[in-house]
Image (cartoon, grey):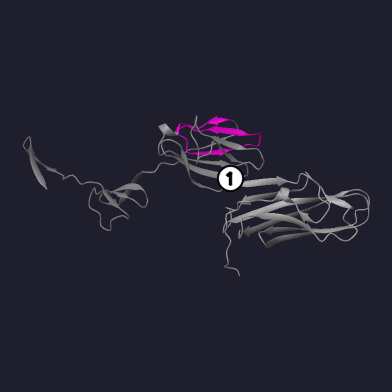
């Protein structure tokens, strides 16, 4: 303890204590002790009676909801996009001027219109010129690296959609619907609809087999007598772990005499493949 004299009276000059970094509060703090609780990310001090918290070192993120085109500001944190009235575009500030800045952007409406995230000028997000959120609760967490934007985390899934371009009325592969270049070991979801159009004759029978390589994912049988010319639709929805790089769709088992009584109609027959990032396959329930 240092002692100094000032106008005839003594004052005790407290020694300066540096702010300590601690993962938890001290058990027996000293009077006026100051420390940074790295677990709580909060500066604290002891006033001689109790531990007093000060302002958090991590400020709360601002949250705003936007339903029209909006230029995101450096002061923003969380932006909720409402595209119920049509597509909305959120323009990011320059990554070059905001290194280390983070944003969370989410789509909150249930419609199919897009929330489009557009970097400044020629800047990109993970080597893409824009990011599109097209489903409710899709979100993305990004950070500026000083020249572009990197994705920290997201629940986005890449997806592709193929449509049958020519009607099929005999056994064989519907090559228009084939998906290639899947990543083995990754989870995917394949969905779609098969539209059968009758020519008005008697019963029709066939099945469509959805396969990942040689593995059958789903078999969609069709057997019906539509009578007059009509259209019937059957759907499929499968989650799987890729054991091969392709997904194919084959028609087989067309009953004798039925091959010309109808067709798997084009344009209304389609398949969609998407990365299944929202789920993880498990063997815990086997």
Tell me the magenta residue range.
69-94
What residue is rendered at 73% in x and 55% in y? 249
Q: Is residue 31 magenta?
A: no
Neighbourhood count class around disc 1 (C-alpha, 10 Å): few under 14, some 14–19, many 20 upward: some
Q: Is residue 122 visible?
A: yes
Q: Along the line of sight, which residue is nearer the eye, 215 or 147? A: 215
Image vertical order of residue 149 relative to residue 174, above or below = above
The answer to if 74 sits in the magenta stretch is yes
272 left or right of 42 in image: right
Tell me if 106 is positioned left or right of 102 in this view: right
Is label 1 in a helix, a strand or a loop? loop
The image position of residue 203, as x and y in percent, is 91, 57
Q: Give 158 or 87, whichever is nearer the viewer.
A: 158
* Residue underneath mark 1: 138
Where is residue 150 shown, x and y percent of the image?
47, 42
In this orientation, which residue lies closer to the viewer: 122 or 212? 212
- Report x, y in % for residue 119: 51, 34
């Amino acid at each position: 303890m240092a002692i100094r004299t000032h106008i005839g009276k003594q004052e005790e000059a407290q020694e300066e204590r540096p702010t300590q970094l601690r993962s938890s509060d001290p058990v027996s703090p000293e009077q006026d002790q100051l420390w940074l609780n790295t677990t709580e990310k909060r500066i604290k001090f002891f006033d001689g009676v109790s531990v007093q918290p000060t302002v958090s070192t991590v400020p709360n993120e601002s949250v705003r909801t936007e339903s029209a085109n909006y230029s995101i500001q450096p002061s923003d944190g969380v932006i909720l996009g409402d595209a119920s009235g049509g597509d909305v575009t959120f323009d990011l500030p320059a990554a070059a001027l905001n290194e280390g800045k983070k944003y969370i952007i989410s789509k909150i409406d249930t419609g199919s219109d897009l929330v489009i995230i557009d970097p400044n000028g020629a800047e990109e997000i993970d080597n893409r010129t824009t990011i599109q959120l097209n489903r409710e609760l899709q979100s993305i967490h990004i950070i500026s690296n000083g020249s572009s934007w990197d994705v920290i985390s997201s629940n986005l899934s890449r997806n592709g959609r193929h449509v049958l371009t020519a009607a099929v009325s005999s056994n064989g592969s519907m090559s228009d619907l084939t998906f290639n270049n899947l990543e083995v070991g990754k989870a995917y979801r394949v969905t779609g609809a098969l539209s059968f159009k009758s020519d008005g004759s008697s019963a029709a029978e066939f099945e469509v087999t959805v396969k990942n390589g040689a593995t059958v994912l789903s078999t969609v049988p069709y057997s019906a007598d539509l009578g007059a010319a009509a259209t019937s639709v059957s759907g499929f929805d499968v989650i799987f772990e890729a054991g091969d790089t392709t997904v194919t769709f084959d028609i087989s088992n067309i009953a004798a005499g039925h091959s010309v009584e109808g067709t798997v109609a084009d344009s209304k027959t389609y398949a969609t493949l998407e990365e299944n990032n929202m789920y993880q396959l498990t063997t815990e329930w086997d």
